[in-house]
Structures are given as C-alpha cells and as structure tokens.
Image: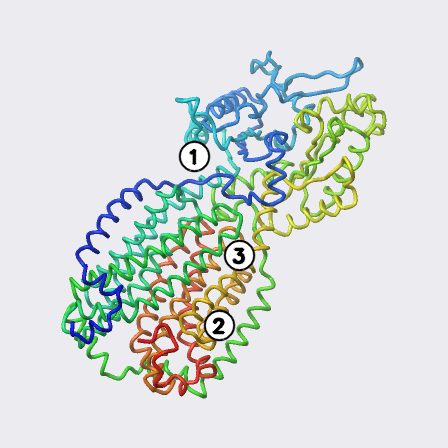
C-alpha cells in the first residue's frame, strides 16, 4: 500500500492485515476446537425452562408442588378398543401390559401412575349394611365373562367414567406423571435429567407401535407436555434439511451476484464458521438446542451473509482501482468495519433485551443469538477480508464491477426517485396511512394460543388428532387449571372452607369454556348422599364436622397430608387465550371477595395455569421489549451518526415494519407467545443492518456535496445492490420454513420473511423520503467530522 494509505490505516487495521497468517491460524485453531464442541450439541429442553419461574402462579405451584400430586408434568395414554368396548379379556390384558411397560420407562413417577389396573383406583357403593368398596379390578379377576361383568359394574360405581374411562366405554386412560430428574439406574447417587426426545421415542416404540401391531383391535393415543416437546424436537430435526436448502439457494444467488466462485465460497465458508462457532460456544457454556433456539443458527447464517455480501460488494468496487487484492480488502475493511460493527452491536442489543422475559427458552435464545452476532465480528468483518486478501476476486468480477462503476443504471436511477421532492411526500403519506391502518388492525392481535391442542404443531398432526380424540371422548380434558385452597392445618375439611369451595366450583362450571370442576367437595357430597340411602336431597355439605370428616376420608389426592391445602381441578375445553383469561379473571374476582384470614384461593397449577402465567408474562413484556429494542437501536444510531435526523431515517422504517408485522399476525390468527415474541425483536435487530449501510453511504456522498437525489443514486449503485440482494436472498432462504411440519416454525418463517423483505423495502423506499424532510444536505456538504463513520 502507498504511504498515504498506510497513514490513514487505523491501529486495528494494521494489527489485522500486518499479521494475516496469525489471524488465519488463530481462526483455524478456534474453529477446530469449536467444531468439536458443536458436534456434541444435542436437542434438549426441560419443563422448567418452558415456564416463567418467577411468576406468582408458578411460585405458588412450586411452593406446593409436593401437595399437588400428578398435577404438573403428566402424559395421558388413551388405549382405544377399535371394535367393541373395553370389557373384553383381550383389551384388559393389553391394557395391563401397557400399564406394566410404562411403569418401567425411565422418568416415570411410578408412585403416581394410574389406570384401571392401579390398586388405588377403587369403587364405592352404599348398601343396606353401609358402604362397600374395593379395587376396580379385584384380585379375583381372571378375564372370564363373570369377572368382566363385575368389572363393568365396578367401573360404573367408581366415578371414573369421563376421567379414566371414556364416556362411550370404548377406551380408557393411563395417567403417567413424570419426574424432571430421576436416579440413574446404573448409579443411584447420580441424577439424570428427563430426555424428552428419548422419552417420546420410547412411548412410540414400546407402547404405540408395539401394542398396535400386537393387537389390531387396539389404537393408542398419547398427549401431554413431554410428548408434544418430543414431537417438536423430531420435527425440528428437519431444520438441517431447511438449512441445507437455504445454503444451496444462497450459493446460487451469491454466485449470480458476484460472478466469482472464490468470493462466493469465501462468504459461505466464513458464515458457516460463524454458525459453527456459535453452536460450539453454546455447548461450551452448557446450553443445548431446544425447539425454540433452533432458529438461532439460521439467524446467524442470515446476518453473516448480510455482512459478507456488503464486504464482497465493497472489495469488488475497490478492486477497480486498487493495485492488488490486499489493498482492496484493506480499503473495504477501513470503509465498512465501523458501520458493520455498529449494525452488529444493534443486533446484539436487540437480542439481549429478550433477557427481561422470565422464560428459560427465550433467555437461552437471546444469549445464543447474542453470542452468534458477536462471533460475526471475527468471522465476517475480520476473517473474510483477510481471506479475500489472499484469494482475491476473479478478473471477470472486477471487469463487471468496473463497467458498473461507469455505466448508467436505469433501475437504480428509477429507485432514486424515492428521494425526489415530489415523490418523497407521497411516500411519507402512504407510510403514515399504512402505519395507521396497521396500528388499528393490530388491536385484534391476541396473546397466547388461538387453537385447541398444540398450536405449535399442524392441526392434522398425530398429536393434535390424539388430543381431539380425548376431548371428544372424555369429560375431563387435558387442559386443567388448578386453584389451590389454602387453610390452616386441619382447616380444609371445615364447613367454613368447603362452603366457599362449593361456591367456587359452581361459579367455574358456569363460566364459558369450562367442562367441569372437581374437589374434595365433590367426594364429600357423594359420600353424604350415600350415607343417607342415596337420597339426592342429601347431596349437600353437612354442618356437622364429624359427618364432614367422615365424608372426605375417601377424597384421596384432593387434599394434602395435614389438610392445609385442597386443590380445585377445573377442566377446560381448550387453552385458548380467551378461555384462560376468562377463567383466571373469574377465579381472581372470587378470591377478592372470599379470601380471609385462614382461607386463601391461590392461582394456579396445572398445564392451563402454567399457560395462563406464560401469557401474562408475554403480555407484560411484549411492548416493553419492543420499546427497549428501539431505544437501544436508536441510541446506537445516535452515537454513530451524531444526528437525530439520521437516527429517525433509520429507525422509522423499522417501526412501520413492526406495526405491519403485528397486523399480519392478527390477520393470520397467529398469537403472541413464546414462539413468536422473539421474532418481533429479532426482526428489528436484523432489519437495522440495511438502514445503517444505506445511510452511511448516503451521508458520505452528501458530504461530498452531491444533491440528495444524486447522492441516493450513487448510494444505490454502491450499496443498494447488496441490500436488495441480501433481503431477497435471506427471505427466500427463510421462506423454506413455511413448509415445515412444525406450525410454529412455519409461522416464524412467514413472519421473518415478511420482516426481512419489509425492512429491506423500508430502507430502500422510506429512508430517502424521510431524508428529504429531515436531512439538510447543505449542512453536511464539505464537512469531514460529525459522524463516527466519516472517513
């Protein structure tokens, strides 16, 4: 390089380019180590990572976890008799074998396992001599017609119809409570964490596949959090295929953009290195890949390609009048390192704001994405220019770049009209109308799930078909909200406690969306009626304490050991956002008027209670995160360009994209939840890159004294091509997600595609229109300082 160029070189540039072999060797050694670490990354998640542990509902659930038997992480296996009913020797034998098989699967809480074959499932009846009862399947059962008839009678007297036994007697359920961690069979002193994917596979192989093949008259249906997560992880293994498709699409488009195979391979290689580093570092700090953080490698690849394209575009332009590839690479590094660094910092800050959400999977996603964009500084801002300084750019690409530098570009000339004094006001008016319309329609945006079953999966998925079967055949759905009634010790059986509980149950059963409710009151009334010859007039709560004590003695599992906590189980039609809000509000209103010293109605346990808590956390964090993201991005732009006007030009198009994105979610019926909230923040983080690159070049041409429209035309010639290409390339790659079997991944793909395209379009269309009103070119002309990006 000439002395002139050496004088302008920064310390960082001299440090990197004067020690290129060392940079290559260090990156190679780090890549080998982190590649080895990345190979050890496994899909993993846990029940506690998916819930907001600091929410009052969850705190109360954890506080009373030992008193709430089988109301947490549970799987339900429904065994259906395809022809006939459950009262056949073959069916009952198959059910027994399945019960025994499930008992020995690792992670099952064996003490709480329940089916018709469980000794704890009993029947009770009133006779002339008093109460009679016993196990639903007695020790004398032998499969004979007489014992099967006794079984039918026992089931009818057990109160399990609609709960463990279907209303039409064609299926029965095995309730399978799970342990988050359990003793290692090979080392009792060591605890093992529940592997959801392995557990799901064992259910498929040892239960569904085995027994459906063994008995064609049996069909197995499985629902529950662990099964849903297992199916999600299996579906997300297809991410590798989508990543491969995105890689090939990017390869083709990059070559079409550069006409240079060397620079294409260089960009893709350094971006893949960034993905490997991110995965390796995630494993190094102890994180795995859960269903939600699996999109992070895609994001890192997308952001890396975005910055890589800018570098290659810059080096191609500089190669036109540079002596060699090293000179072109150094000039490009000097020109684009700072705007690239600012864009990456803006990305990272945007991702870090997700840490305020108290949900483990979102926090891990935020940390993983932040690590990934930090890695891009080394791979795409440093390693890529160094690599290109060795391999160079093909003569064909350089000749093409030279021709582009001197010829007129009709397309860019047309787009430069966005900065025209007549077109700019029209663009701003259109943007304001779109903003107002989007803001109005986004009022329909809901928090939480909007569909039955598992909205993360397709409606026709096997899990959702199984869930529909259980909803249609049982009175107690898999969506359970548990209200914890807390009293002083031995206080849960008093009339002063049971009477308000009875009122709460009546209120719940008359709340839309509720199927039924049960508690110790349900058992108490049944027993009191039985003690009075089954007379329906006596199906009420007695004020005699001895009668009450006797009546609740059979309510096993519906109060704790010292009778200080009694759960009310509210079975819901679904866990849609509106249903949960309606039910939670009803309980809270009841608690406000009935809570007193020694009696509290506490929310909430059960999967519906957890879902309600998650929805509240998302609702509280949604606006906060968006505001924080924009504040952080605005501060970064303000520090960089030292101009409020410049900051507005970059940030306002992003705001429009966010508003239109919310409106799109409302229109498509996509709720704001754990899966979709990160996309809103990530879309802003990725989108700011376009605006920063465009404005930094526009400002340099304005400082050279060019009028706004001409300056914008020159900006489009130099940077606009890279921005347009990047937006289209990334959108096409992410759009492949829309074909995923996992619905939430398809939703993410749709939203990210929309946000990538709109952020690109906003930067190309709205930024120059805003600049027409906010930027004063005459004040910038001839100025050298004022911006950190001025060179």
Q: CA distance from mark 2 to mark 1?
A: 45 Å
Pointer 3: what residue? Answer: 670
Secondary structure of the residue carrying tag 2 is helix
Coordinates of residue 780 in the picture (x, y in percent):
39, 83
Quick one: label 1, few (<14), some, or many (20+) residues within 10 Å? some
Identify whether 630 is placed above or below 481. below
Quarter containing the N terminus: bottom left
- 648 vs 481, left or right, is left
Is disc 3 surrounded by few (<14), some (14 to 19) or many (20+) residues within 10 Å?
Answer: many
Mark 2 burial class by Cα count in 10 Å: few <14, some 14-19, many 20+ = some
Q: Residue at x 23, y 74 (%)?
A: 317
Label 2 or label 3, whichever lies nearer to me, is 2
As drawn, 712 above or below 304: below
Task: State the image coordinates of residue 378 (x, y, percent, origin top left).
Answer: 29, 57
Q: N-terminal of the two: label 2 or label 1? A: 1
Which mark's residue is nearer the viewer, 2 or 1? 2
| Distance of label 2 from label 3 (alpha carbons) | 25 Å
């Amino acid at each position: 390089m000439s002395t002139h160029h050496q004088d302008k070189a920064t310390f960082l540039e001299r440090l990197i380019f004067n020690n290129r072999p060392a940079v290559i060797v260090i990156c190679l050694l780090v890549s080998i180590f982190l590649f080895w670490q990345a190979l050890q990354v496994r899909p993993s998640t846990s029940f506690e990572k998916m819930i907001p542990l600091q929410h009052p509902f969850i705190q109360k659930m954890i506080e009373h976890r030992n008193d709430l038997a089988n109301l947490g992480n549970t799987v339900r296996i429904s065994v259906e008799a395809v022809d006939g009913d459950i009262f056949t020797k073959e069916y009952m034998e198959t059910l027994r074998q399945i019960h025994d098989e499930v008992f020995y699967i690792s992670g099952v809480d064996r003490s709480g396992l329940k089916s018709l074959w469980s000794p704890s499932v009993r029947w009770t009846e009133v006779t002339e001599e008093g109460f009679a009862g016993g196990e639903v399947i007695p020790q004398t059962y032998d499969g004979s017609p007489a014992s099967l008839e006794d079984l039918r009678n026992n089931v009818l007297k057990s109160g399990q119809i609609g709960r463990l036994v279907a209303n039409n007697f064609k299926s029965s359920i095995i309730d399978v409570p799970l342990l988050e961690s359990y003793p290692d069979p090979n080392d009792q002193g060591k605890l093992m964490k529940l592997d959801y994917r392995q557990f799901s596979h064992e259910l498929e192989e040892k239960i569904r596949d085995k027994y459906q093949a063994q008995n064609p008259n049996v069909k197995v249906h499985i629902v529950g959090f662990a099964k849903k997560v297992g199916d999600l992880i299996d579906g997300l293994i297809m991410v590798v295929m989508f990543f491969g498709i995105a890689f090939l699409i990017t390869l083709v488009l990059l070559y079409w953009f550069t006409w240079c195979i060397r620079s294409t391979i260089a960009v893709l290689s350094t971006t893949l290195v960034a993905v490997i580093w991110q995965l390796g570092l995630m494993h190094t700090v102890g994180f795995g890949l859960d269903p939600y953080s699996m999109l992070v490698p895609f994001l890192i690849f997308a952001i890396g390609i975005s910055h890589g394209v800018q570098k290659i575009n810059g080096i191609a332009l500089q190669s036109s009048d540079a002596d060699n590839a090293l000179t072109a690479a150094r000039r490009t590094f000097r020109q684009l390192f700072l705007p690239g660094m600012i864009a990456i910092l803006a990305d990272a800050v945007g991702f870090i704001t997700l840490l305020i959400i108290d949900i483990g999977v979102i926090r891990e996603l935020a940390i993983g994405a932040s690590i990934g964009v930090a890695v891009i500084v080394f791979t795409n801002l440093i390693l890529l220019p160094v690599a290109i300084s060795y391999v160079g750019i093909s003569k064909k690409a350089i000749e093409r770049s030279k021709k582009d530098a001197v010829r007129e570009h009709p397309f860019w000339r047309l787009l430069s009209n966005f900065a025209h004094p007549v077109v700019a006001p029209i663009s701003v008016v259109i943007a304001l109308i779109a903003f107002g319309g989007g803001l109005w329609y986004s009022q329909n945006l809901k928090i939480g799930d909007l569909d039955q079953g598992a909205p993360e999966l397709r409606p026709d998925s096997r899990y959702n078909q199984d869930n529909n079967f259980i909803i249609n055949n049982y009175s107690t759905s898999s969506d359970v909200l548990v209200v914890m009634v807390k009293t002083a010790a031995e206080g849960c059986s008093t009339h002063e406690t049971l009477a308000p509980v009875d009122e709460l149950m009546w209120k719940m059963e008359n709340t839309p969306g509720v199927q039924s409710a049960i508690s110790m009151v349900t058992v108490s009334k049944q027993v009191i009626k039985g003690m009075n010859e089954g007379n329906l007039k006596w199906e009420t709560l007695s004020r005699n304490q001895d009668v009450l004590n006797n009546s609740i003695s059979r309510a096993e599992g519906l109060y704790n050991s010292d009778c200080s906590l009694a759960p009310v189980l509210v079975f819901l039609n679904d866990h849609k956002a509106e249903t949960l809000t309606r039910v939670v509000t009803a309980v809270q209103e009841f608690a406000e008027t009935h809570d007193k010293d020694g009696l509290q109605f506490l929310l909430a346990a059960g999967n519906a209670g957890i879902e309600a808590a998650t929805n509240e956390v998302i609702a509280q964090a949604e606006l906060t995160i968006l505001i924080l993201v924009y504040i952080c991005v605005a501060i970064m732009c303000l520090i960089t360009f030292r101009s409020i006007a410049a900051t507005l030009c970059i940030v306002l198009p992003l705001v429009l994209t966010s508003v239109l994105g919310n409106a799109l979610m409302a229109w498509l019926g996509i709720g704001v939840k754990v899966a979709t909230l990160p996309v809103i923040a990530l879309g802003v983080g990725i989108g700011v890159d376009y605006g920063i690159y465009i404005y930094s070049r526009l400002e340099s041409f304005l400082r050279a004294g060019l009028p706004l429209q001409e300056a914008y035309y020159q900006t489009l010639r130099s940077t606009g091509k890279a921005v347009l290409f990047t937006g289209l390339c990334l959108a096409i790659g992410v759009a492949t997600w829309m074909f995923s079997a996992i619905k939430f991944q398809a939703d993410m793909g749709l939203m990210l595609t929309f946000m990538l395209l709109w952020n690109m379009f906003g930067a190309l269309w709205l930024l120059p229109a805003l600049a027409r009103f906010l930027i004063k070119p005459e004040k910038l002309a001839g100025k050298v300082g004022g911006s950190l990006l001025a060179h």
